[in-house]
Image (tube, helix red, strand yellow):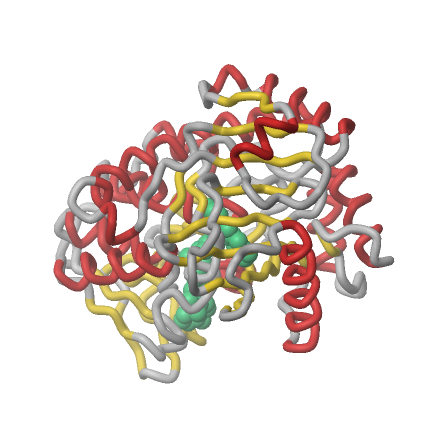
Amino acid sequence: MYSHQTEPVVVLGGGVIGLSIAWELAEAGWQVTLLERNHVGFGASSGNAGLIVPSYTLPLGGLDAIGEGIRAVFGGSKTLCLGRLTDWKKITWLARFVAAGRMRDRLRVASDINAVAQLSLHRYREIMGVDEGSFCDLTNCGWLDIFETPSSLGKALTEVRKLESLGNRWEHLSPNEVYDRVPGLDVPVSGGILHTDDWVVSPDRVIGAFYDKAIRAGVTVLEHTEVTRVTTKGRRVCELGGNFGVVPVGHWIIAAGWESGTWLHRMGASQSLMPGRGYSITLMSDRAAPKHALNFVERHVVVSVQGTRVRVTGGMDLDPGTPATDAFRLADIRTTGQHLLPQLAWEESVDWAGSRPMTPDGRPLIGPLTGWDNVTIATGHGMLGMTLAAGTAALVRQLFENGGRPPAQMRPFLPG
Ligand SMILES: Cc1cc2nc3c(=O)[nH]c(=O)nc-3n(C[C@H](O)[C@H](O)[C@H](O)COP(=O)(O)OP(=O)(O)OC[C@H]3O[C@@H](n4cnc5c(N)ncnc54)[C@H](O)[C@@H]3O)c2cc1C
């Protein structure tokens, strides 16, 4: 099913994951059609922080993070907000999230993901870094974690030392070194950690680049095309249907972001996904922009420079979102950002919200779907979809080129 290059491969979802896979497979000679309900980049893949961060592969931590989430319900924290707990799917997901929270397990996940992040960075540099680096604003600016309290700095230093074997370089900065690197910073700080190997891109430009490359490689991209039906025969998917009629399927790749969860359920898989809603405010000028990407750890606000714009991001709400909640959360991030960095160009900006596809243990799901001969899944990249996209696509290409045998780096992410 993987070796017959004339059978149509149908990719569901025009986010960074679906687009990069569609391009890689078309480059390798497969005939690819990509179906996207809205326009490419509509989901989580255009308005995010754009960090390519091999340093940030430790998943959120079980009970600690749940404590934060409960405090968020009562207004005391802004990281993970649990939202309403009326839904069994969410309660089951949270139970799995807590079960996956032991440090030993999280370190194993971090190590597996780091390998894909390194592959991804290598691939980004290869495909965009040399000729089109300025086009995607791929920049090795480093990522600076800024701590206001000694206790959170101490906790982060312990974690970063535990991850040292992965080879990500970092520096511990004193408060004065933080102020030197972030002119205009207007809060007392207890120190910083600078991750020197981390990069930033402009996500919408990456989407544009993958789209152009996909079209040039022969991918048929159908936008405003919503898949609602799947026709199966035995262990095979034969057709996808929806508002566009039907398309025949030789091989189906599910890359529909957080909504992939619905398809996993419909195909009988036990894995579950939650939408992790986040928000961004894009400032249209880079006036007074910091030279590093910044992470205000206790405030859960990230600032990244993307070409001539500055983006301020935050929030992790386990709910699909409503316009009222989005407006409330965006106002909160704006107030916090203005307090931290008042000199930025806050006067002209664009608001955005999108949902990350979150697995309970932080492991993406990449590989053939158990029980089916012609279905592959590529989702669940959570907070790291930009970081992992080029690497994920390279692994899926290897899977196809190996006739369906998963490459070694894919094995920790196989569904089921
Ligand atoms: C605030 C925020 C900041 C972030 N910052 C970073 C960062 O700095 N670095 C990083 O690595 N990651 C970051 N992320 C995470 C990253 O954005 C996501 O992991 C990534 O975009 C997921 O990509 P995707 O292609 O899987 O999903 P999506 O981008 O959501 O794409 C899925 C697509 O599938 C389409 N679709 C769904 N169902 C159907 C259907 N039935 N028919 C047709 N089409 C369908 C949707 O319309 C959507 O366009 C951030 C996310 C957020 C929210």
401 vs 166, left or right, is left
The one of 415 and 258 positioned closer to us in this rendering: 258
Residue under the image location 31 percent in, 83 percent down: 245
Residue under the image location 37 percent in, 48 percent down: 201
How many dots with numbers?
0
The quarter holding residue 158 reads: top right
Residue under the image location 32 percent in, 32 percent down: 407
Spot occupied by residue 304 in the image (x, y as percentages of width and height): 48, 49
The one of 311 and 175 positioned closer to us in this rendering: 175
Q: Is residue 375 in sight in this rendering?
A: no
Report the residue that reaches farthest toward the right: 74
Spot occupied by residue 53 in the image (x, y as percentages of width and height): 46, 37
Report the residue that reaches farthest toward the top: 165
Q: Is residue 164 in sight in this rendering?
A: yes
Spot occupied by residue 255 in the image (x, y as percentages of width and height): 41, 57
Q: Is residue 237 above or below residue 404?
A: below
Spot occupied by residue 91 in the image (x, y as percentages of width and height): 76, 54
